[in-house]
Structures are given as C-alpha cells and as structure tokens.
Image (cartoon, grey):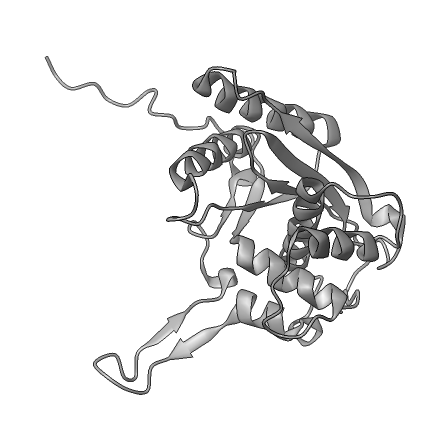
C-alpha cells in the first residue's frame, strides 16, 4: 500500500484507459484525494461497439468517444495500457492503441504507457498480495474498490482503467516533482527510475536506463506542448519538384 506523499497540494486529474473494441474502459483519478475516499474516482465508464459493426468504423467510433470524454472532463494527464504482442488478437489491439494515441495527440494530452502486467503489479500492492500473485479480474475490481473506500460493484474494464490512472498519477506526480523519490514504493522505483549496469558478458560495464522517467518519446509523451502549435501531420511539407 502506498500513501499520499506530495511536496505540494496540487490536485491533478488523470484519465486512465483500458482499450477494448467491445468494452473500452476509462476512469478519472484525482491524485490529491486521500486513499480510501470516493472522491479519488471523479468518473468512470465504457465505450462500446457491437461486433457486427464494420471493423474500421469500430476503431473510428472508439477514437471519437475518447476525444469526447477528454473534451467533457478535461483531465490534466493520461495513462493507457499498451497491447502485449503474441497475445490473443494482439494486432487488432495494437490498431486500437494507435487510434487511441491519435486521439490523445489530437487533444494535446500528455500520456504514459503501461503494460498490463505493470498495472496489475502496482494494483497488487493495494491489496498487499504476495509477490508473484496473479491478479485476475476479481482482484483488480477489489483493488479499485479498496482504493476508493468501497462503493457499488466495479466493472473489470473500468477497474483496470482506474488502476492505470492511479499508477499514472503516481508517475506524473513524480515527474512534476510533487512526489519525491523517497515516497515511491519498491514497485514504483522499479518502474519509474530503474537503472541497470551489466556486470558480465560482452555488455559488462554498460549502463542502461530502464525506468520510464528516462524514456520520453518512447514510454511517455508530452503532447501538451503541441497546444498553440499546428500538429504536423505531413501538411505543408515541400513538394517534390515536378
């Protein structure tokens, strides 16, 4: 279990996303609300598309639904699960991930990416489950419910999205300096700041920075910097001379 550990009391609302063509979960987390308070979850829901809908139209519908939620709720930051390849229908999920990123960039939102296993490991800390515990849908719902102090039953898509928002909120608080390194949990230290130096083999002595904090434009993007600027989609480039 983590505690709120901020250098300031600035409230940041983080939108968490769990992409799916059938039930695309979203939830908004208030980083400054105390653990166990219902006010930690500002809103949540799902975008749905029927399987009979034309496949391209489904992607487009989910993209526009995401943009509509952003415009309605005006979150400060975003976190999203990215697809794991070689899983069931991973290519289709990657397509939805790209449409989601297009929407986030068009809305000039800062976003950080997490794998499903990372989101589950962080949620495991909420329930104080032992290391190696496999978090299933029931566990994720229980973790979300515990974080907000109970309430009515949670849909697992919304629970996943909310827990992605919580993890993302911790990252963005750390990135912005509201959360000090001493306040990070061991799981967060591993994900946010890990640095590895090889001691054996051909790479001995080489240091690589695995933590997300070192991986801007790879694992997180500051698309808010595009506000006030024209988003470059290729328009305006010099044409090849005829």
Side (left or right) of 145 relative to 205: right
Compared with 34, 208 (above or below) is below
Q: Considering only vertical position in the picture, is 184 above or below 149?
A: below
Instruction: Determine the residue positioned at 45% across, 74% down.
Output: 195
Residue 177 in view, yes or no? no
The answer to which quarter of the image holds residue 92 is top left
Q: Nearer the viewer, residue 72 or 2?
A: 2
Q: Position of residue 43 (x, y in %)?
A: 79, 37
Residue 71 in percent (x, y) is at: 68, 26
Q: Position of residue 30 (x, y in %)?
A: 78, 48
Q: Is residue 125 above or below residue 47?
A: below
Quadrant placement of the C terminus: top left
Q: Quadrant of the N terminus?
A: bottom right
Q: Is residue 68 visible?
A: yes
Q: Residue at x 52, y 33 (%)?
A: 100
Q: Position of residue 14 (x, y in %)?
A: 69, 45
């Amino acid at each position: 279990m983590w505690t709120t550990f901020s250098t300031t009391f600035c409230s940041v609302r983080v939108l968490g996303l769990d992409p799916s063509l059938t039930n695309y979960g979203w939830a908004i987390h208030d980083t400054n609300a105390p653990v166990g308070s219902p006010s930690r979850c500002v809103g949540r829901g799902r975008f749905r598309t029927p399987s009979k809908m034309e496949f391209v139209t489904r992607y487009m519908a989910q993209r526009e639904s995401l943009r509509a939620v952003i415009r309605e709720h005006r979150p400060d930051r975003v976190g999203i699960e990215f697809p794991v390849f070689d899983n069931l229908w991973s290519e289709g999920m990657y397509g939805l991930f790209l449409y989601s990123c297009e929407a986030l960039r068009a809305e000039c939102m800062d976003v950080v990416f997490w794998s499903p296993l990372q989101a589950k490991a962080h949620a495991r800390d909420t329930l104080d489950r032992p290391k190696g515990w496999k978090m299933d849908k029931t566990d994720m719902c229980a973790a979300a419910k515990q974080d907000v102090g109970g309430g009515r039953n949670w849909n697992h898509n919304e629970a996943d999205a909310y827990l992605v928002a919580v993890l993302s909120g911790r990252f963005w608080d750390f990135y912005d300096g509201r959360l000090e390194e001493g306040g990070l949990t061991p799981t967060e230290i591993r994900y946010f700041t890990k640095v590895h130096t090889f001691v054996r083999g051909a790479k001995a002595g080489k240091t690589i920075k695995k933590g997300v904090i070192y991986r801007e434009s790879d694992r997180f993007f500051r698309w808010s910097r595009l506000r006030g600027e024209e988003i470059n989609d290729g328009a305006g480039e010099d044409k090849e001379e005829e």
